[in-house]
Amino acid sequence: MPSDSVKKIAVIGGGAAGFFAAITAAESDPEAEVTVYEKGNAFLTKVKVSGGGRCNVTHSCFDPTELAKRYPRGSRELRGAFHRWQPQNTIAWFAERGVTLKTEPDGRMFPDTDSSQTIIDCFMKAARDAGITLRKGMPLKTIAVSGNGFHLTFGDGSEAAVDKLCIASGSLKASPLTSAIENLGHSIEPLAPSLFSFNVTDPRTEGLAGLSVQSATVRALPKSPPQTGPVLITHRGFSGPAILRLSAWEARTLQAQDYRFEISINWLGNSRPEQLRSTLASLRADSGKALIKNRIPGDIPRRLWERLTEISGISPETQWSQLPKEKENTLIRELTEGRFEVQGKTTNKEEFVTCGGVRLKEIDFRSMESRLVPGLHFAGECLDIDGITGGFNFQAAWTGGHIAGLAMIT
Ligand SMILES: Cc1cc2nc3c(=O)[nH]c(=O)nc-3n(C[C@H](O)[C@H](O)[C@H](O)COP(=O)(O)OP(=O)(O)OC[C@H]3O[C@@H](n4cnc5c(N)ncnc54)[C@H](O)[C@@H]3O)c2cc1C
């Protein structure tokens, strides 16, 4: 609807995706008038607390197909998008602005400073240099299509007429924007929390909080695909990368079960019961006189091993040669398929996201533009996209923000 030739662009949400979209648009078309409208009193608040205050910016995975596999929702759509903007581009983008990232052994990437403030400072400077108008305390209320553009109204009663609109409002959980988006004809996939720990009270782990097993395999019964990786025993139950990954892949199923379900843990990773049986047979043959408690058949902490032998009815003085068959069977079961009742979940403070959001079929991922409303773009967590923990959620925000930002000025 705006008449003059200067393009007016509104970005809704001063978070990760919104800043990336706004900066990309404003740097690519210095003539464009780009405004970020943020409902809160501060920008980039999630970036601030992200990664425990260190900001896990991205992940050192540079193959778009491999990278896309880290997204329980959005994998297919992101594969193409990552060919346009992927972690290598993110790393270079920050480096060009003087922010270098380092890689941890598990692939997570953080600013060298280990401080999310570095990322915030970088964005604020880039936004300032690009002439972006930043407006706080401006919750978007309504969106009306008006000619070739949009008419927007905000919480304080003010209005704006723009040519292009990018919604980057983050999670739609309890968001008043949901109805404004639906009124434009878009559908919202059901929302559910993702990336949470499991609450378990069980004598097998009582008093063992703080122990972690580097490579355990966890499944939600009856039939979720297994997740292998570190599992941490906490005061409330289980956490760690393998548990968080399971919570992400099964987010909708576990929500439907009201977070009451059974899991099976193989403390020895992918070791099968038959393999373990032959390992125990060798121990009996080669170290028959050794105490069971002193020979651990795998990479698990001593205190957990002692607890599992105790639970299996094996006294601390038992030697390998004295292990009765039925106790051996119990021990094998406890080690390779220990079953635990989960009763509830706990938010993972380091990183959590909402699964669900704007239906992906309604978005053209080459431009992040709505297939229903020309000129309307989406980026970030408001879409039905979420990744496992490790920097993948921010990468999706940078990728969507970059593609939307470029598309809005062409
Ligand atoms: C504690 C925590 C730690 C995390 N750590 C990491 C991490 O280290 N690495 C990682 O990859 N991911 C992390 N995540 C996930 C990551 O923060 C999100 O995936 C990412 O912030 C999504 O970006 P976004 O721009 O879509 O949404 P947000 O960053 O949430 O930004 C959306 C913005 O829109 C604003 N808004 C909402 N509605 C309106 C409205 N009506 N009008 C105007 N403005 C509006 C909000 O106030 C907000 O500022 C973490 C999440 C949490 C909660």
Image: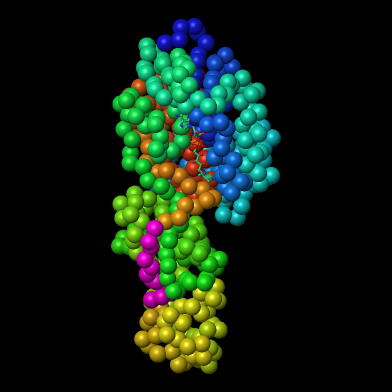
Residue nearest the observer in this picture, 169 or 158: 158
- Residue sitting at 66 percent across and 28 percent down? 125
- Report x, y in % for residue 343: 38, 61
- Residue sitting at 64 percent across and 24 percent down? 128
- Report x, y in % for residue 240: 50, 59
Residue nearest the observer in this picture, 92 or 101: 101
In the image, is residue 339 above or below residue 150? Answer: below
- Residue sitting at 47 percent across and 63 percent down? 236
- Report x, y in % for residue 39: 50, 29
2 with respect to 290 (left or right): left
Residue 55: quadrant of the picture: top right
In the image, is residue 80 above or below residue 250? Answer: above
Q: Residue furthest top?
A: 4
Label tally = 0
| Residue range of the region highlighted in magenta in the rendering | 333-344
Residue nearest the observer in this picture, 331 or 233: 233
103 with respect to 182 (left or right): right
Q: Is residue 341 magenta?
A: yes
Residue nearest the observer in this picture, 403 or 146: 146
- Report x, y in % for residue 139: 47, 27
